[in-house]
Image (spheres, rainbow, N blue to C red):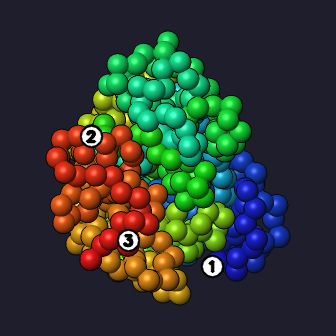
Amino acid sequence: MFRGRLPLPRATALPIALPLALLLPLATACGATDAGGPSDGKTVTVTVGYQSKTINTVTAGTLLRSLGYFEEELTARGRKDGVDYRVVWQDYATGAPITAQMTAGKIDIGSMGDFPLLINAARGKQLKEPTRLVSVTGYNLRGGLNTVVTEPGSPLRSLADLKGRKVSTSVGSAADGTLVRALRRAGIDPAKDVRKLNQQPSVGASALAAGSVDALSQFVAWPGLLAFQGKATALYDGAELNLPTFHGVTVREEFAARRPAVLDAFLRAQRRATDHLRTRPVVAAESVAKETGLPAEVVYLYNGAQGIATFDPALRPELVAALKEDVPVLKEAGLVTDVDVDAFVDTAPLGRAVPDLAYPKATSPKSELWLKGQASTRTFDSPGALLKAVKGASVRAAYVPDAGTGTLWFADRAVWVADGGEWRAFVTRSAAERYVSGHAGSRIVAYADAVRLAS
């Protein structure tokens, strides 16, 4: 049984076991059968790679780890098969190092974004350590999890303005894929017309603040974090691409074949964490904030009841189809030669572990208000109703969906438009300006003025 919770450093083994196991050295590697365990093979170490600050992976990482559901599932499994299970959690900033560790046989289960997943599949096949995609964590059917931002006060107003500029991104990430596609739609050659700097998200954020890059294209939760801190302004909402983006769970094929019961336990635990997040979104946001150091208001922007990410482990057909559309982008960048997506996607483990999995489809988001001192939020049918509620209130965070894409954004960071007696909000100024140009009499209004004028 599980014997208490130890402090959780970057890579930690959590004992789930009999007293004898507590006397044995913790395994530092995984993949090899019974690594670090006694000679009779009664101890099994499972290593999970995750990205704590990529918060739409929390149901397979940060939140799951803090809830202890995987350990609970393995404890129950251990009672049946007489095995002591240990879980090692390894935290990374991006998916690339997780893939490197998986192809070296040192991580068994990992979570990462759609583009890194394809690289994971390609590298696994190339290095004869094949992997399989077995579930989804969080997704956005339009692509709103990725955003291009600039420094506040930047003269840049649209993607066209990036020509000849320096842009920080993480090459091979979903955010890089969004940047490449968006630039092409704007008539800009991403290979020739901009100077891309391949940087970790935190490095890129620092570069933006220092003025050494003109823009930053990144994935959840960096754009929202920088906007919340007043350190960035959204230049491009990834949802304008109208292409699904998601993060998912991949497993080493050899491990899945050798330890199917462990994979089942993980997927059941992920489903429990998903249920927890969907039914208690504020509690989950506060928990993830505590574990990661991110503001809870930022976590809730993405993971909340109306958040940018929808959490559902199912390998939905539209997500698999989007994955296939990503392959040519990575091939052109020279990051993969080819990927057999149908062979990579494996729906059998989830169907076996969670046969009753069913969640409603994502609906259009509503405006939402989180007042200080409150453990729940209020939703509103219109942005105008939110503005009225904000007036004179003690606001912790207010959220409003983009009028065109539906991407949720902080109300005080959105660009507001008054159109007759109606109010609309947009993630970017360029989107607001496009709306105004097509609607006579409408005008852009500062947030403070919108709150004052709302009646």
Q: Nearer the viewer, residue 180 or 90?
A: 180
Kindly identify which numbered label has been placed on residue 173.
Answer: none
Q: Nearer the viewer, residue 172 or 149?
A: 149
Counting residues from the N terminus, which is met first, the one under dot 1 or under dot 2?
Answer: 1
> Which quarter of the image is occupied by the C terminus?
bottom left
Give the spatial CA distance, label 1 vs label 3: 55 Å
Q: Residue at x 57, y 20 (%)?
A: 195
Q: Nearer the viewer, residue 407 or 111?
A: 407
Given contact means CB atoms under 8 Å apart, are the residues at marks 1 and 2 in contact? no
150 left or right of 351 in image:
right
Kindly identify which numbered label has been placed on residue 451.
Answer: 3
Q: Is residue 175 visible?
A: no
* Secondary element at image label 1: loop
Counting residues from the N terminus, which is met first, the one under dot 1 or under dot 3?
Answer: 1
Kind of residue sitting beneath label 3: Val
Counting residues from the N terminus, which is met first, the one under dot 2 or under dot 3?
Answer: 2
Say which of marks 1 and 3 sits in front. Answer: 3
Label 2: which residue?
A: 434
Give the spatial CA distance, label 2 vs label 3: 22 Å
Kindly identify which numbered label has been placed on residue 1.
Answer: 1
User: Eyeballing the image, is 405 above or below 284?
Assistant: above
Q: Position of residue 271 (x, y in %)?
A: 40, 66
* Secondary element at image label 2: helix
Kind of residue sitting beneath label 2: Arg
Kind of residue sitting beneath label 1: Met
